[in-house]
Image (spheres, rainbow, N blue to C red):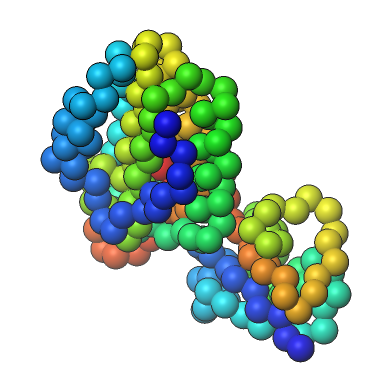
Amino acid sequence: MEKKPKNIFISGPVPAAFVGDSIQKHSTKTDIGAHSIFLGQVRDDVIEDKKVMAIDYTTYEEMASETMNEIREAIFQKYQLTCMHVYHSLGRVKVGEISLFVFTSSKHRKAAIQACEETVERIKGELPVWGKEVFEDETYHWKENS
Amino acid sequence: MPLTVSLFGQLSDITGSNIIEVENVIDTNSLINNIKERFPLIKDNKFAVAVDKKIIRENTLLTEQSLVALLPPFSGG
């Protein structure tokens, strides 16, 4: 089981190839029977007639690391997971690019799917990360998770 | 001794900095009142208060070593 504290933040978008490589790395863990993956993609919302072209992410990193460790511990307690990986972007992520990658693996599908969903919901609600929606004219609007 | 307070998101737009120093405060209520007096626009914003990286719900005593942060609503993911 991988429960050691990790840095979840990466600078800029999560490349699609990185997701592919992460899947490939699990081929040696032959007790895994199911993976569940969530990818958050930056959407071109229109706010007061202006279209979002990117989100600039910032965090309170010391608190975010502790919070993520608590979430990770709780999820491993609750579900029979083989492993779990979380990556969140910092800095600018353009529309259409990936800003959040959550990857859970287990013997059977239900634990992987439920753990993935719960982790995403907790990240959205508890992780001190802020997204500044930047419009095409470089003005911006601070996003708020619903 | 001043206490250093970290601010994030839209709050740092108001203060013009991610870090401000606040003098002569003994607890989180007096700290918030002090900051709202200096930066009245903060009153228009929702935010949570974290002391030593934990969100607090009630007035909390502060020491010179306390890590205080004001956190607007999260929007990660």
* Residue A133, percent from left and from top: 37, 54
* Residue B9, percent from left and from top: 50, 62
* Residue B26, percent from left and from top: 86, 75
Q: Identify the residue shown where x is 53% and y is 64%.
A: B8
* Residue A5, percent from left and from top: 46, 48
Q: Which of B3/A52 is in front? A: B3
Q: Which of A112/A30 is in front? A: A30
Q: Identify the residue shown where x is 72% and y is 71%.
A: B66
Q: Is residue A32 visible?
A: yes
Residue A136 falls in which quadrant of the image? bottom left
Q: Is residue B74 visible?
A: no
Q: Which of B64/B35 is in front? A: B64
Task: Using residue A126 as the reference point, say whether residue A136 is left or right of it.
Answer: left
Task: Using residue A100 as the reference point, say whether residue A60 is left or right of it.
Answer: right
The residue sitting at the left extreme is A17
Residue A18 falls in which quadrant of the image? top left
Q: Identify the residue shown where x is 55% and y is 36%.
A: A73
Q: Identify the residue shown where x is 66% and y is 78%.
A: B4
Residue B11 falls in which quadrant of the image? bottom right
Task: Using residue A129 as the reference point, say whether residue A56 is left or right of it.
Answer: left
Q: Point out the image quarter for the N terminus of chain A.
A: top left
Residue B54, placed above or below residue A115? below
Q: Which of A67/B37 is in front? A: A67
